[in-house]
Amino acid sequence: MDEKIRNAVYQAYTGESKASLRLKVFAEKAENEGYPQLAKLFRVISFSEELHGKRALRLLKEIKSTEENLAESFESETRVAGVAYDEFIKYAEAAGDKAASLYFSQSRDVEEIHAKLYKEAMDHVLEERQTTYYVCDICGYVSDGVLPEECPVCAAKKDRFVTFE
């Protein structure tokens, strides 16, 4: 693929991904404010944007074997936790923005846990191990097989965890 076309497809993928997430959040807000039809519209368009993003990933040939996808995910989480978030934390602390600093710190900690989960999965891929995951809906912390009483990253209570069986 031509490099300019590749960059354009990647930009489209980035935009579609952001739009999909943004619209999901807008749908939650509309639902909470009593606008179910608008919430539905936001969810529908979010789904459409997600489809656009998937098509872009296929064009970019970013979807590989599960083993390769797992290794890439591990590397990505490690890079983000070890480099990007540390820089973001420094910026926020220098600016005196405590909310951003907390967000970046907690996100970094959770990204490190994501990397650990990917590493464990790579080590156990042949075992076909089944597990239940619990995700803190405040900070994104993921627990493997055990529902914590309290989130070790943000201290949210166990009722704030979403179960993935």
Image (tube, grey):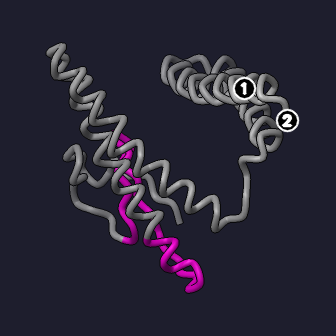
Give the Cα distance between marks 1 and 2: 10 Å
| Amino acid residing under circle 2 | Met
User: Which one is in front, 151 or 58?
Assistant: 58
Q: Is residue 143 magenta?
A: yes
Q: Residues within 10 Å of mark 2 (few under 14, many from 20)?
A: few
Q: Residue at x 34, y 47 (%)?
A: 160
Q: Residue at x 18, y 13 (%)?
A: 95
118 vs 162: above or below: below
Question: What residue does disc 1 label?
Answer: 7
User: Which one is in front, 119 or 18?
Assistant: 119
- Earlier residue among tags 1 and 2: 2
Element at badge 2?
A: loop
37 vs 159: above or below: above
Question: What residue does disc 2 label?
Answer: 1
User: Which one is in front, 94 or 143?
Assistant: 94
Q: Is residue 7 magenta?
A: no
